[in-house]
Image: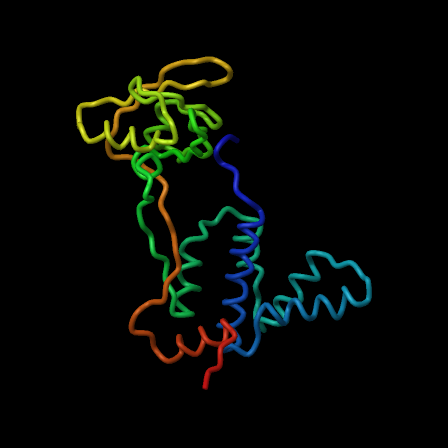
Amino acid sequence: IPNRKVSIYTEGCLIAFMADVLIRRATENRNSLDDVMRILYNDFGKKRRGYSEKDIYRIIEKVAERPMNEFLDQYAYGRTDFRPMLEECLEYLGLKIKESDSVKYTETYLGFKSTEEGDKAIVRAIYPGSIADIAGLMLNDQIIAVNGNRVSNNMDNWCRFYAKEEKTEITLTIFSSFRQKELIIKPGISLGFKNYAVEKAKDLIQHQETSFKLWAGLSVY
């Protein structure tokens, strides 16, 4: 499905992070995902043996000292939104997600990402349901002009300039599927891309401070 794919590597990292924190929370920071990896290495890697998904499940639950099937079924195999669980795990460590607008106008307000390559900007991502998505912009479209102005590593600036006038429509001249055409976009309230960062929360309790230091490999003394 176009524009609906995710990276298995990114999702894998997030699942591993959440599993690590859940193990730490369940065992009061005595165990972690590190222990899971050590067991896998000692019991399988060193002995040149393969392992199955059932082996991984079993070892994770052994280290967590509690059932983990619900978590694994929901996040490794299901379609559960990661955000609530991520925030819960970050809170345990005294961290939080910081969300901010992208510095690029087209990403935040029109809903598409692009790479500017001289006399063209190539569309790399489109936010589902955004103004750009509704207007019909497609991945890999090449934007060569904004309201008749040829782009030269300044497509985002031109879009920002014309968007200042509320009644101004933005006409993108694009090459799409080897054909040149014009696409009209009306700036307004839109879904768009955000920037995300993780930062330390304020007013941490002692347990959060200790948990963060243990997770980060810092001295708790």
Quadrant containing the C terminus is bottom left
Res 38 quadrant in image: bottom right
Residue 134, horizontal then vertical, whole percent: 35, 26
Note whether 194 is above or below 183 in the view shown.
below
Task: Name the quadrant containing residue 204.
Answer: bottom left
Q: Nearer the viewer, residue 219 or 60?
A: 219
Q: Position of residue 169 (x, y in %)?
A: 24, 22
Please tell me which residue is depicted at 44% across the width and 64% down the height of the picture: 89
Residue visible at 50% across and 67% down in the picture: 21
Q: Using residue 171 as the reference point, say whether residue 50 is left or right of it.
A: right
Asked where in the image residue 182 lies, by quadrant, the reply is top left
Vertical position of residue 183 compared to residue 159: above or below: above
Q: Image check: 35 left or right of 183? A: right
| Image position, residue 139 (x, y; %) | 47, 28
Q: Residue furthest bottom?
A: 221
Q: Residue furthest left?
A: 166
